[in-house]
Amino acid sequence: METLLKNDLVTPLQDYYNPNVLLNLGPSHPAMHGTLRVMCRVNGETIEDASCEIGYLHRAIEKLAENKTYHQWIVYTDRLNYCSALANNVGYVMAVEDVMGITITERCMYIRMICLELARVIDHIICVAINALDLGAMTVFWMLYTWREQAYTIIEGMCGMRLTTSYARIGGMAYDLPENFQAEMKIFLEGLPKTLDDVEKLLSANRIWVDRTKDVGILTAEECLGFGLTGPVARASGVDQDLRRDRPYYNYSDLDWDVVVATKGDVYDRYLVRMEEMRQSLKILKQLCAKLPGGSIWTEDSRVLIPKKKDVYEKMEVLIHHFKIFMEGIDVPPGESYRAIEAPNGELGYYVVSRGGPKAWRIKIKSPSLALFQSYEHSIKGAKIPDAIAILGSLNIIAGELDR
């Protein structure tokens, strides 16, 4: 039928047909993985153009740093990438310790490295499991989430919290490791590798998974560098970069582990990179647990050392010192520092500027999710609508550190 007849009027059908439809993805949709909004211009199932919008979770975290003491602001780092809060804590306190010239104890360093690698594992579990769930693989979700809950049980024993941990402190850690830590970690380190093998047997050669992920959302190495991408997404595209090796901090250079790099840069390669990175993190954790030294978790620097409760109750000078640390905050000398860690999704950096006193003059955060979301528009142009969900899941954008 070539014409549409209405009230004796003859109108060509092409005047009624517009192939371009605006489709709003998010911010209130489970597949968007947070408060992300993407306005797409679609032609049928093909996304011809897209525009991303951020700001739905903006909480002025960087501005709050100017009005909170250095210790008070630790809790806000939990709310950046809340899937790996332990790593956020460590990256921030490293920057403040640099400004103050504080050297932490060896035991504290090992505990922080355990935190960093545990955070990487649980973050990658979330990425792989939820992306698989979005594409219909519910069994994989339950298999991996069993071990994520086991990891959270370990973290709860370490600091009393599961999701938002606030575990690290400037100059030390809030608590030492619990007595059953080694036993719980042994169960985790021995059990998760078998589950990773089982997941790969279910997914890696699965026809549906392969069709939905291979050659989808390809980012070349040059494009990754242009967008400023780091972490697993960049390494899946052949960018051989990892701050733990290339800009070593703590004790990573003394451990036996490998940087995982792929070549294709599609959703499938990002899945493979994260699976192998979990194995490498477990390898690191085994070495850390075997070499875990004894001693104190706190530096002896009196500027940050929290007095023992017994002394607080019995000695007036110690009581006053304790009161000043918690009520006024620690006195950080003028200076500045930028410290970056290899967070689960890439380079997470804190730029701390002090003009003296208990509060920062400025704190700026470099979050991997901001760069990842910038690349999303480019990745989905020319893709199908279902591909947009697969691509987003493989980037693992966390809205908490995107908006700040």
Image (cartoon, grey):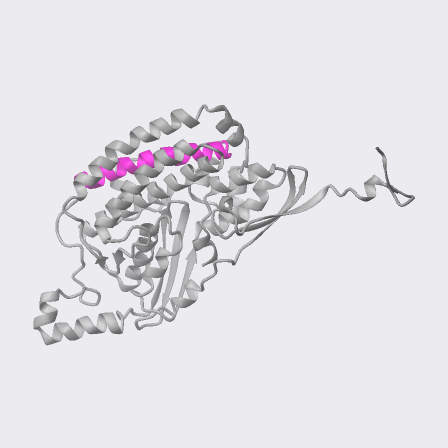
Magenta segment's dominant SS is helix
Residue 230 in sight: yes
Q: Nearer the viewer, residue 92 or 126?
A: 126
In the displayed structure, would residue 261 be above or below residue 250? above
Q: Is residue 258 visible?
A: no
218 inside magenta stretch? no
200 to 329, vertically: above or below: above
Residue furthest toward the front? 7
Coordinates of residue 297 in the picture (x, y in percent)? 17, 54
> Was residue 270 drawn as part of the magenta stretch in this picture?
yes
At horizontal 23% and vertical 53% (from top left) the residue drawn is: 159
| 265 vs 180, nearest the viewer | 180
What residue range appears in magenta? 264-291
> On screen, 246 above or below 295?
above
Q: Give the quarter of the image for residue 337.
A: bottom left
Q: Quadrant of the N terminus?
A: top right
Quarter containing the C terminus: bottom left
